[in-house]
Amino acid sequence: MSDSQDIETATTAIQTSQVAQPDSKTRRYDRQLRLWAATGQSSLESARILVCSGSATSTSVLKNLVLPGVGHFTILDAHVVTPEDAGNNFFLEGLDSVGKSRAEEAVRLLSELNDGVEGQANTANLDDILEKDPSYITSFSLVIAHNLPSSTLDRLATLLWSNTSFPPLIVIRSAGFLAEIFIQFHEHPIIDSHPETPASLRIDKPFPALLDHALKLDIENMDVIDHGNIPYVVILVRALEEWKASHNGSPPKTYEEKSEFKKGLLARKKKADEENFDEAAAQAYRVWTETTVPNEISKLFSDPGVTSLTPSSPAFFHLLKALQQFSSQPPHTLPLSSTLPDMKSDTASYVHLQKLYKARAEEEKLVFKSILKKNGAPVDDAIVDEFVKNAHGLKLLRGEKWGSLDADKNALSACLKGNTKETATHLALSALARIQAANPSVQPTEDDLRTAVLALIGGELPRSSSGEVIGESELEEAIGELARAPTADLPNTAAFLGGLVAQEAIKMITRQYVPVKGVCVVDLIGSWTGVVQP
C-alpha cells in the first residue's frame, strides 16, 4: 500500500502529536498539585517559615513542609545536640551530632530532602531577638514554636498579636504521648475551602442557553442509545419547564407533587436500564430547592470588613462587596460555576453541556469584574478568577491570642463540661508548663500537677447537676502520663505531630481548606484527637 508506514515512522508521528510532557517540577509535585493546584503551590513556594526549636517534633514538621516545596525555612535554636536529642531525632546523625549546633545539624540534613528549598540555621537566643530585633521574627510568613518556655512563648505570642499584619503562630506543646496545637491568627479569609457541597447547577433557574438546549432536543424521536445518554441536568430542566406549563408556573411543592414528578421522570424511560433517568429521579430535589445565596455566604456580606469598606481594605472584602452587588441582581445567585459533576452521558452530550456552562460562567465572571472595576477596587485577575470559581465555598475565620482560654476560668469550666477528655488533657499540659516555668530543673509530681490544674480552673473542678465531679478520672489519666514523661519528645508522637502540624501550616499558607480553630488535643495512648473551643 502506498500510504503504509514503518513502525518507527508511525511511533514518531504519535509522539510528536502528543501534548507536551509536564516539566520536572510538575512531575515532582504531581500528587499535591491535585490537592491545592498551582495557586496553592505558588503560595507554598513563596512562604518563609520560622521554626523556634530544633527538636524531634520541629524537624518532623519541617520534613513535611520541605518535601512539598516550601520556599524557605529557618530553625532558630541556640542549643547544642545532647545524647537525648541524638536518640529521638531522625534528622541528627546520632552520636556524631552530639555537641554540635542542633539548628545547623537539622538544617543540613533536612535540606537534603529537597534541593529546591532554602534552609538556614540561626543559633541566636530567641529571648534576645525578641528584645533587640523583633522585626526579624515578623518578617516571616508563619512562625511555629515547639515546647518553648512559657515566658518566652508569651512574649512571642504577644509580639505576633500586636499587629494584624504580623504572621500567624502555631504553638505545639507535647510530653510523652500527649500533645496539643493551637493556631494564633487575627483574620484568615479562605477563597477555596474545598467544600463538600458542590456548587449549584441552577436547574431551577436555567440560564437561556441551557433552557434553549433542553427544550429544543427532540427527545421523543431519539434512538434508544442517544435517549439513554441525555445528561440528567437536561432531563430535569426540560421536565421542570413542562411541569410548570401545566401548574401555573410553579415547581412541585407538596409531597404528592414531588412524588408525581419523580414518577413522571421514570416513566420517560424507553428502556428499563436507562441510568440517566434514574439519576434524574435521584437529583430531582434540585428542581424544587430554590437556588439562592447560601446562608453562610450571605452572612459575610454583613461582616464589618464589608460594611466599613475603605480603599485600603484587604482585597477579600472588596471581592465580597462585589459579590453582594452581583447577587442582588436577578437571578439572585452566586456566579455560575463551570464545573459539572460526573453523570451518565456520552462524550458528545457531556462536552456540549460543559461548554454551555463554561460559556455562561465566563459571561457572569465578566459581569462580576465590571462591578469590581466600577467600585474602583484593583484586584489581580488571577485572584478574581479563583474567587468567582469558588464563591460557594468562601470562609472568613477570626482567631484568638494564645493563652486567652487559660485566662478565662469560666470558659475552662464550660469546656470541661462539654469536652471533658480534651479539656482535661489541655489543663494538664498547661499545668505542666506553669510548673516548668517556675522550676525548670524539677520533675513535677502528680500532686504538683493537680495543684496547678486547680489553680488554673479556679480552685475546684466543676460538678454536674447530680453533684458528680466532672473530669476527675480524665484528669488523673493525663496527669499520670505527664508525671511519667514531662520532657519526653517521643519519636512516634513527633512523627504524628509532624504530619498534623504541617497539614495545618499548609492550610494557613495556601489559604485553602479550613484550619483547626481552638486547641487541638492529641492523645496517642487512647488514639484520639479533639478540639477545645469555648
Image (spheres, grey):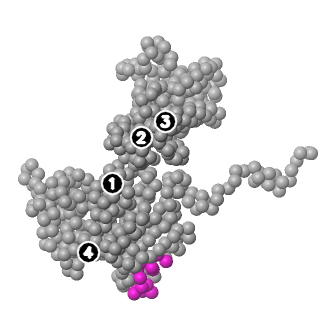
Residue annotated with mark 1: 186
Pointer 4 or 3: first along the chain: 3
Q: Are marks 3 and 2 in contact (CB under 8 Å)?
A: no
Whether residue 128 is situated above or below residue 235 in the rendered picture: below
Q: Residue at x 37, y 54 (%)?
A: 515
Residue annotated with mark 4: 485
Q: Tag 1, which secondary structure?
A: loop
Q: How far separated are the C-alphas under marks 1 and 4?
A: 34 Å
Q: What amino acid type should be assigned to the residue bearing mark 2?
A: Leu
Indicate the quadrant where residue 470 lies: bottom left
Q: Position of residue 163 (x, y in %)?
A: 33, 58
Q: Residue at x 41, y 25 (%)?
A: 288
Marks 1, 4: nearer the viewer: 1
Q: Tag 4, which secondary structure?
A: loop
Q: How far separated are the C-alphas under marks 4 and 2?
A: 49 Å
Q: How far separated are the C-alphas under marks 2 and 1?
A: 19 Å
| Magenta span includes 107 | yes
- In this rendering, position of residue 522 left or right of residue 342: left
Pointer 4 or 2: first along the chain: 2
Q: In this picture, which residue range is highlighted in magenta?
A: 95-108
Q: How far separated are the C-alphas under marks 4 and 3?
A: 62 Å
Q: Are marks 4 and 3 in contact (CB under 8 Å)?
A: no
